[in-house]
Amino acid sequence: MCNTVKQCGVLLLAGGKSSRMGQNKALLEHDGVPMIQRLAEQCVAFPEKLLSSPIELPVEGYTRFCDDLPDCGPLGGLVTALRRCHSDALLVLSCDLACYRSELGNYLLSFLGSGWNAWCMRSRDGRAHYLCGIYTKAALPVLEAALEQRQLKMSDAFAAVSGHMLELEYTVFPDRLLTNLNTPEDYYKAFRPPVFAICGLHNSGKTTLCEKLIRRFGEMGYRVACIKHDGHCFEPDVPNTDSWRLGKAGASPVMIYNREILAYNRKKGVMCADELIEMAMQEADLVLLEGFKNSRWPKAEILQEGEASVSRDPVALIADQKPESSLPYYHRNDADGIAELILRYLHLTPPRKNS
């Protein structure tokens, strides 16, 4: 089938039971804003806005409906919306897309002239996100047939309409834009990224402790990235090497690599910590920060004898002897205890092992 799409609306799906979350995901709040409202704020430009939900939700300008056939999952909501909408297609978004941004929607919309019946995103880990995609009215007869036959899996319905996958890998968008919230742990990971700082004054033992923690987390199966803050002007390259000479000549960035190692040296345009963390999280389960005592990230502060805390809102203190503080205390040699603190605070679960 080939079709022409002139107008696209948006459909927010909020009819699920949220059984694994334990509460209505659409009403989960972050910074005082319900999830469904955060999502709706990213969809203001659509001429037609539909909401699949059995209850009223705090979004304005949306036409709410109950599914024609209840208890049929997202396929029931999608079919009902395509039957009722005036648009030629709908951008379909599940209410638990915690980090969705309108830029990703604009990317999906750029394929409206493709003639496809449906298309959705696939994340870098190979997972298909059928509820972050566009479905056209041309797909409706096939979707209705699947619904009538109680073939309710979105993967089967997507295949039946010859849907196309768009690979996030070939875009500039980060993986977190496709984050789904199904459990309380998912919620904490989305809004409390797996980032933890070890801070302290000069020569307090930050690097030594970070070494121990990295080894401990590695033994547990975690991929760990580490970002070190340096308060002084430093030279990251070896003087008089080829890469050093290229940098001195004005190249920025200078990259040198072989099959196992890539070194990236950029001297122009300072990157903020959030950018570095975003880069690190593409390849790591946990990001350790060394330093960053004034950052907003959770941190444990190492104190030397007689020192008072100088960091912003530490969650624990590390020292040779217990300081006068109500904060949790760990001995500097208790790497196992500090590792457990970090995992517990970040709500991290053991990483999946490759079978």
Image (spheres, rainbow, N blue to C red):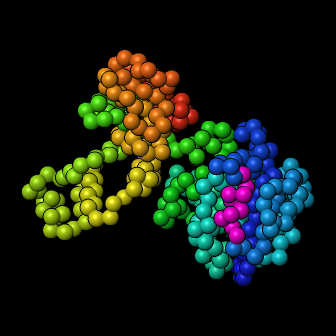
**Along the horizontal axis of the image, is 62 left or right of 328?**
right
Q: Nearer the viewer, residue 265 or 77?
A: 265
Instruction: Name above or below for residue 251 compared with residue 3.
Output: above
Magenta stretch: dominant SS?
Answer: helix
Give the total of numbered labels: 0
Instruction: Name above or below for residue 184 compared with residue 103.
Output: above
Q: Residue at left 58%, top 46%?
A: 191
Report if residue 100 is visible in the image. yes
Instruction: Name above or below for residue 222 compared with residue 236.
Output: above
The residue furthest left is: 240
**Along the horizontal axis of the image, is 49 left or right of 256?**
right
Q: Position of residue 223 (x, y in %)?
A: 42, 39
Report if residue 93 is visible in the image. no
Q: Nearer the viewer, residue 155 or 217?
A: 217
Q: Position of residue 47 (x, y in %)?
A: 75, 76
Residue 188 lies in what quarter of the image?
A: top right
- Asked if residue 35 is among those painted magenta in the image, a careful observer would answer yes
From which residue to which does the magenta span run?
A: 34-44
Residue 221 lies in what quarter of the image?
A: top left
Q: Residue at left 76%, top 40%?
A: 23
